[in-house]
Image (spheres, grey):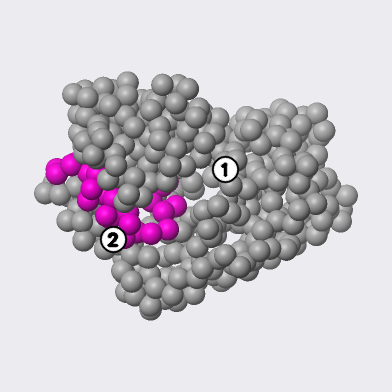
Amino acid sequence: MEGLEGAVSQRAHCRSCGSSDLATVLDFGPTPLADRLVPSDALDVPDPVWPLTLVFCRACALVQVTFDVPGEAYGDDYPYYTSTNPGLVEHFAEGAREIDQRRALSDGALVVEIASNDGVQLAPLRELGARVLGVDPASGPAGEANRKGLTTRCEFFTAESAARIAEEMGQAEVLVGNNALNLLPDLEDFRVAVRALLAPGGMLVLEVPSLLETLEQGAFDNVFHQNATYWSLLAMRAMLAPLGLEVFDLQRIPTFGGSLRLFCGAGRPVTSAVHEQAAAEERAGLGDEQAYSAFGARAREVRDRLRQQLLELRAAGRRCVAYGAAGGMATTLLSFLDLPPGTLEYAVDLNPHKHGSWTPGHRLLIRPVETLLEDRPDVALLLAWNFADAILEAQGQWRAAGGRFLIPIPEPRLV
């Protein structure tokens, strides 16, 4: 792969606390950007690639990537629409009910969602009685939300945009970020934004991939350029402290291979779930560098085993494809594997917005999932392994006809 690294900037200090005491966890090498699919008429244009290095802050325990890719590198053609995933639609409906239990929405409370995509979380919040506003920089999903009547501003969530919202609409009783905080490169700017937009006594609700589960599963494919930070409760507490907020309740949820839904506020009693999570992280050594060294070694071992298995399947005449051209996970795993061309023939994905485009880096044509039954490949590398149960059930007919999934994480296995 070829790339353009001139505009990239490397951080020498922690995004949260500013410390320069950073330890390298895993270096993925030059990696394409996730969610930057390649149209058929641009196949002769080299993919931009940037360094991807994961580090651990010894001062505040925040795990993060060190390189910032300029926003313009991503372009405006963001292909991910949350509404195409039925599991996530129900997940965010349940999330709205959980928010309502902790802060009643029936009185028209203003709820602002960061990175609201096509409004899948906004819709059930509005149904419960909230005034809702979404903020998302991708014109496609933001436009779709607006077409549904879910008011969404097409812009990045920053201290500046938060101040404008507060001035025009008043402060928010609830500020929601689902898989959003980890995408924000500047945590101090985020803190300034929260100070401006969150009303006194308001509630900040964050869903973030759980670093504890990432390490337990060895889910190294959760690392990609957009995902600037990787959260433990330990690091979250340190990040929130300057705001006078604390995590008063949490839920462990299954999204993205295991995530945390964190309810943050001031002056609220802390639940047993928070204490239990803190104890689990302490047992796992999430404040110690050794846990991250072990994670890096495990990632390299799984990569080598998975690569060898795919090469052996191909050498034995098995036709192999990929299932799930889903953003960061697919891009990182395929890049890290560095397979010879032709090892995987193409990719399939549920999202019709991706069909006909090509994955970055290894340039796999993305086709509908129905292609599995029509074309009958032998093996599908399950890049969306975090939805394995649902996908295995949905593709029962292809499996009954002899198709097998190769699940890469936590350990490579054929099913």
Residue beneath the point at 29% across and 42% down: 164
Residue beneath the point at 36% across and 50% down: 158
Return the disc, 1 or 2, that comes first in the chain's sequence: 1
Closer-to-camera residue (280/100): 100
Closer-to-camera residue (212/123): 123
Q: Is residue 370 left or right of residue 230?
A: right
Q: Which residues are magenta?
A: 179-203
Q: Is label 2 in a helix, a strand or a loop?
A: helix
Image position, residue 64 (x, y; %): 44, 64
Is residue 283 something one can see in this rendering?
no
Residue 369 found in image quarter: top right
Image position, residue 214 (x, y; %): 47, 57
The amino acid at mark 1 is Asp
- Residue behind mark 2: 239
Magenta-colored stretch includes residue 390 = no
**Disc 1 or disc 2, which is closer to the eye?**
1
Question: Which quadrant: the C terminus?
Answer: top right
Image position, residue 20 (x, y; %): 38, 77
Q: Which mark is residue 148?
A: none
Figure check: 311 above or below 194: below
Residue 231 found in image quarter: bottom left
Question: Which quadrant: the N terminus?
Answer: bottom right
Q: Is label 1 in a helix, a strand or a loop?
A: loop
Figure check: 109 above or below 261: above
- Residue behind mark 1: 76
